[in-house]
């Protein structure tokens, strides 16, 4: 079944699925590597080359030293995930919050924050939001609800999610580099 509640809906050959974290490898990574190939960025340059406002009020902050390569390889001290969506639904305010937040440094882990920041860099360098970018053939950033597999009956959004991104941070940001792709 593509959906169980409130009404069962059958799966079909053209059912769209939320690809979740596969967004990192299918969408964000190839685009960052293309920017490097085109010499728009240097993978070993800090993200501040594209995001000068990253921790801009503390020039000695560790976040200002993080490189594109480190984010791609999950070799940063950013946490695995943070409930960014709990700070509101204004995507511009949330972007500013993420860029200015003093992140608690930990051991390098697989981190959504790395790819959220890479997504911000892509947005700045292209001049458009992720959802305005071409996701490539066979992919989209949403799907018609009746053509998509449901992901959950969301207690936070108060509805069954079908055709809209399941990841709460990506939803609140209205697009991000770590999640949001459908296929």
Image (tube, rainbow, N blue to C red):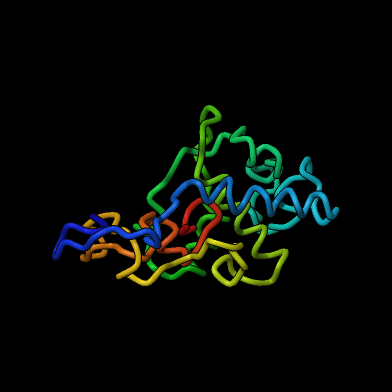
Which residue: 32% across, 60% down? 12
Q: Quadrant of the N terminus?
A: bottom left
Quadrant of the rendered image containing residue 49: bottom right
Q: In this view of the protein, which residue sits in the foreground, 3 or 50?
A: 3
Q: Which residue lies furthest to the left in this view?
A: 6
Q: Position of residue 35 (x, y in %)?
A: 77, 54
Q: Where is residue 168 in the image (x, y as percent from the top left)?
A: 37, 56
125 relative to 6 in the view: left or right:
right
Instruction: Count the numbered circles shown.
Output: 0
Quadrant of the rendered image containing residue 99: bottom right
Check the image and report above or below for 166 versus 69.
below
Which residue: 61% across, 59% down? 120
Which residue: 58% across, 72% down? 132
Q: Position of residue 78 (x, y in %)?
A: 53, 39
Q: In this view of the protein, which residue sits in the foreground, 47 or 141?
A: 141
Q: Which residue lies furthest to the front in this view?
A: 13
Q: Position of residue 85 (x, y in %)?
A: 38, 58
Q: In this view of the protein, which residue sits in the foreground, 60 or 40?
A: 40
Check the image and report above or below for 103 versus 143.
above
167 relative to 153 in the view: left or right:
right
Q: Which residue lies furthest to the top in this view?
A: 107
Check the image and report above or below for 118 versus 14.
above
């Amino acid at each position: 079944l593509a959906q169980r509640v409130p009404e069962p809906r059958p799966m079909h050959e053209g059912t769209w699925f939320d690809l979740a974290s596969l967004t990192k490898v299918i969408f964000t990574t190839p685009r960052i590597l293309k920017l490097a190939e085109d010499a728009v960025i240097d993978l070993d340059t800090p993200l501040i080359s594209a995001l000068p406002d990253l921790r801009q009020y503390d020039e000695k902050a560790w976040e200002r030293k993080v490189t594109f390569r480190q984010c791609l390889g999950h070799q940063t001290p950013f946490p695995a995930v943070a409930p960014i969506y709990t700070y509101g639904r204004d995507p511009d305010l949330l972007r500013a919050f993420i860029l200015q937040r003093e992140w608690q440094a930990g051991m390098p882990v697989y981190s959504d924050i790395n790819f959220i920041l890479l997504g911000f860099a892509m947005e700045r360098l292209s001049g458009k939001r992720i959802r305005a970018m071409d996701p490539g053939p066979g992919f989209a950033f949403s799907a018609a609800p009746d053509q998509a597999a449901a992901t959950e009956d969301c207690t936070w959004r108060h509805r069954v999610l079908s055709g809209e991104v399941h990841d709460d941070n990506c939803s609140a940001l209205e697009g991000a580099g770590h999640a949001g792709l459908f296929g």
